[in-house]
Image (spheres, helix red, strand yellow):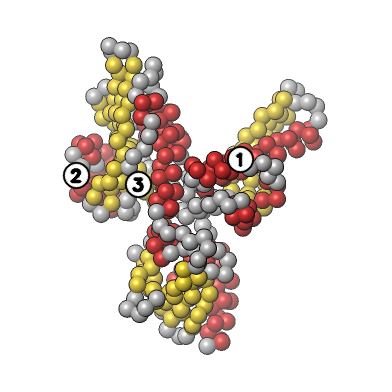
Amino acid sequence: MFNFLVIIFVFFSNIANCFANDDIYFIENNEIFLENNGNVLELRERAKNISFQNSFNILARKILGPTDFRKFQQLQDIEISNLIKDYKFQSEKIKDTNYFANISINFSKEKVKKFFINNKIKINVIISEEYLVIPLFKKFNTFYLWEKDNFWYDELIQEYDKRSLLKLFFPKKNHLNKFRITPSNLVNENSLKIQEFLDFHKKKKAIILFLEEDFDTMENKFRSKLLTKLFFNSKFIEINLLKNKALYDNSDSSIIELIAKQVIIDLENWWKNKIDDYDFKEDNKNEFDILIKTDDLKKVLYVEKIIKDILNENDLNIKEINQNFIVYKIQSNFSVERLNLALESKNLIIKKSDSEDLYLIDYN
């Protein structure tokens, strides 16, 4: 048994880097513009401090729900530099009258988590599986989907941050996608065509964003209406976005860009609220065992690495090990349901076995 254990951890050390996760703690393209006062060292220091503040605000907005973000905004005298792993000036331009810098910031995952825990602010860092986005646009009684003139599609992509907790996939505008699914398929809720489209792109769930924009000639106002639905397992579930719809239904000009910005924010909050739907015990720990068969060592190490990345340090420990399987003991704030939500993006699911308090890992 001892020799087998040594083999596992030696092998793990050699391949651990193969399983990199999306790094939501890395904030890039912080562009800082300052007036040139003639002191380059001072300008660089100011640019660095401003980028630290801006980056931490961006990170906080990513991992905090609206209520917790407001709590964060009330905090004062935050030593942000203590939370940073490293940073880099990607580019820098110094002219006679102005100064420009582009700075990337890499925050420490452990220090950021500890900071919010100490301030009693709940964070959500579960990354979603990838949702396929279908941005249907109707303007002046004409439908646009995969056409070049679908500006709704363009604005959504422009606003979407690929490092968000919510992973979105936008199919390309091309004639092949026009052939595979049409606006009428979506309006008529043709489940078969939508499922075929998902299957082709190897996705499980779709978010349909149907924006309709018209012009009221009597009042000289633009009218906008948004309908959002989640499609999964041949079912349509309405998602309520743009809570203050009146703001978007009576404008002097087209506001597609503004709507796209708010829709992306609302979708990200929708995902955070989805995480919050599952039990998370701040004080009491959930305890259960997971059995993983050792017929494929790479899979064992992959699953171990994934679960360790989700849980806190020391939440996962080996309880029993032999030639056929490994049993891990989990003691965590995460319930099984919440852990499964985090595992969706990796096509893994924890299922109950016949034995009490023992679970198995299933590869979807």
Q: What type is the residue that disc 2 sits on?
A: Asn
Picture layout, residue 167 above or below residue 347: above
Give the side of residue 87 with respect to residue 136, left or right: right
The reply to whether dot 2 and dot 1 touch (C-beta < 8 Å) is no
Tell me residue 294's x, y (percent): 43, 79
Residue 28 visible in rendering: no
Query: SS for tag 1?
Result: loop
Point 70% across, 28% down: residue: 34
> Tag 2, which secondary structure?
loop
Q: Which residue is mark 2?
A: 190
Residue topped by disc 1: 74
User: What amino acid does circle 3 point to?
Assistant: Leu
At mark 3, the secondary structure is strand
Q: Nearer the viewer, residue 43 or 123?
A: 123
**Residue linked to disc 3:** 132
Q: Position of residue 188 (x, y in %)?
A: 18, 39
The earlier-in-sequence mark between 3 and 2 is: 3
